[in-house]
Image (cartoon, rainbow, N blue to C red):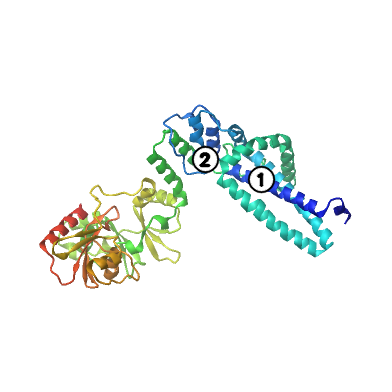
Amino acid sequence: MAGAASLPDAALLGWAGALVVLAGLFAMTDAALGAVSAARAGALARTGGTTAGGWRGPERRRGPDRSEPGEAGRASRSGAAPWGAAALHAVVTDRARYLNLLLLLRLLCELTATTLVALVAIDTFGVGWTAALVTAGAMTVVSFVVVGVGPRTIGRQHAYPIGRVSAPAVRWLGRALGPLASLLIWVGNAVTPGRGFREGPFVTAGPNGGEADVTAELRELVDLAGESGAVEQGERKMIHSVFQLGDTVAREVMVPRTEMVWIEAHKSLRQALALALRSGFSRIPVIGASVDDVLGVVYLKDLVRRATGADPHSGDRVRVDELMREAVFVPESKPVDDLLSEMQGARVHLAVVVDEYGGTAGLVTIEDILEEIVGEITDEYDVELPPVQRLDGGAVRVSARLPIDDLGELFDVVLPDDEVDTVAGLLAQALGRVPIPGAAATVGGLRLVAEGATGRRNRIETVLVRRAGEPPAGGANEERQVADARGRS
């Protein structure tokens, strides 16, 4: 072919390979600059130990959990900005302009490389489908792997070092070729129906320096404030938890149906009051035929008000379904931040979570959502107990989370562990419901008695175990009374 005669095929392939490498560099820089935070870049560009926003405070040895987390801290401690930090800050401040240029240069390199490979294929196979398929197949793989996946992954993994190294060259290219990219964007907007984007459709620009994700920028500002000491570590975690609420759904924070405490609609007021006092819950779902048939929610204050009313003997005649309130149902995919707003507006503290088939998946309370922000809410009387505590008379108090195999070894028995893993799960399986303090069952020759509940969800903390048929010793009874008293406090 005359077009290929001026250069050998090896030279054409060499130029094509060089262009592919150059396109990969442009893609890597594009990914790195897209991942750099404008706030952190500004902190890197500052000198004299000042971080973003002008905050000054005690320096920390460890940066936030981001790529190259200690960069801002190292800049502050050294008193001088790292090389390229000022250029990086200038680039991310006008991010859309430079990313458009990098995209134009990458496409130019890729298309030119494809053209050179096509010339070699035509010279080798002749004009026809064979040359076209070889060119298309080879360049598709090369463009996806060598230009797409590899460089972009490296760019996002090492965003700040790559950004600092490449920013000066990118600024120079922006001065030289920036008007060309802007001209091409203007032409594209002119021939496209509807209103075009002034800075191009390739970058989603925010109001502050082209930041695409305002939430991510706010998180960076919180991290920088934490580095300077203006925000405490606990406050920093709490603020990040608030940001994460929008990405959390009800299914992730709910109490699963296997841990729900419920009462049947036909039960009496006295039975409901006893269940509320034993379980420690002030709101209990009322069910009909099964747990999937939630009819309403009964409140402890309604039970107490009716039990202490004009007729104190009505406890056995009044049914639970006469006192229950209407239940609120929410899908398990509902975002937690929206759910919190709705529950606050409706002044509802408990909602039943349903799955895609309409069955009961669990229940969620306002406290469950607040725990996502402030962490686990525990009782002031909660104490750390040993996993195994031997008592008088051969009885043993074990943690409810103790593995079943460990319990079997203590008493030299074999216990069923096909469907459950812990002692609490074994007791729940034997009872057919969630165990509450005082619930007892016999499994594998062992007598299991649930003891004091702990935490806001009143989960069983310990289980008293002895061999079936053995009378409880006085010491064991005394120990159990102490544990039950602790659970009710």
Foreground pick, 311 / 316: 316
Of tags 1 and 2, the one toward the viewer is 1
Residue type at mark 2?
Glu
Residue 178 image position (x, y, % from top left): 71, 37
At mark 2, the secondary structure is: helix
Residue 370 image position (x, y, % from top left): 36, 48
Q: Is residue 461 left or right of residue 248?
A: left
Rendered residue at 53%/37% (across/down): 40
Rendered residue at 56%/44% (across/down): 158
Q: In this view, does 486 lie above or below 53?
A: below
Label 2 sits on residue? 217
- Using the rendered view, name the quadrant where residue 413 is placed: bottom left
At mark 1, the secondary structure is: helix
Label 1 sits on residue? 25
Foreground pick, 364 / 464: 464
Residue 225: in sight, yes or no? Answer: yes
Residue 196: in sight, yes or no? Answer: no
**Residue projecting furthest to the top:** 48
Residue 284 image position (x, y, % from top left): 29, 59
Rendered residue at 42%/65% (across/down): 358
- Using the rendered view, name the quadrant where residue 297 is placed: bottom left
Q: Is residue 229 left or right of residue 20?
A: left
Residue type at mark 1?
Leu
Foreground pick, 409 / 3: 409
